[in-house]
Image (tube, rainbow, N blue to C red):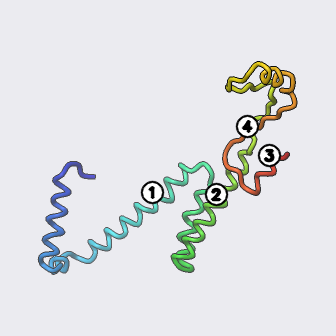
Amino acid sequence: GADGVAPQIGSVLLLLMFYLTDFQLVGYIPKPAFSSMLVLAFIDMIYTWFYKSYFKTKDKFEWMVVPAIVVCAFVFDLLSAVFLGIAFSTFIFVGSFNRSGVVKYVANGAVIRSTIERPFKKCDWLMENGDFIQILVLQNYLFFGNASGVYN
């Protein structure tokens, strides 16, 4: 790409020139120039969004969302493709959090102590009954599907 302000000013002046001549200057540009620009843009997008992203993505099921959206947009319509992308992304999100687990670790009151200052009588009671207190340290989000992991 170009650096600096000069290319930006040049493109604005070129667009202004086309606009002031009612885009009649576009007729003098050969059609193969526009066609080749479209083909180059297509090749660049395929290379960037399909080829390079395939190697950057760890979970290949996540990568499959983009081709599925493109195919659905061609076969059905754009709105169906958007809904398909949202549905795939939701299932991938919920599945990844379901695999990671809900409970980070389990401890009791004898192992983990509170940082709150209490009177001596209450601290003594906690020292005696700390084994009866169960502490679950949770991680990630709780959904209906993975909430049973807390119970188990």
Question: Which of label 2 and label 3 is nearer to you?
Answer: 3
- Disc 2 designates what residue? 61
- Which residue type carries mark 4? Val
Q: Residue 134 carries which label?
A: none
Above or below, 66 relative to 114? below
- Disc 4 designates what residue? 137
Q: Is mark 1 on a helix, strand or loop?
A: helix
How far apart marks 2 and 3 lie (CA) works out to 28 Å
- Which residue type carries mark 3? Val
How far apart marks 4 and 1 lie (CA) works out to 41 Å
- Disc 1 designates what residue? 48
- Which residue type carries mark 2? Phe
- Which residue type carries mark 1? Thr
Q: What element carries label 2?
A: helix
Asked where in the image residue 72 lies, by quadrant, the reply is bottom right
Sort mark 2 into few (<14), some (14-19) or many (20+) by Cα contacts within 10 Å: few
Label 2 with label 1: CB-CB less than 8 Å:
no
Which one is earlier in the sequence, the residue at label 2 or at label 1? 1
Q: Which mark is residue 150?
A: 3
Which one is earlier in the sequence, the residue at label 1 or at label 3? 1
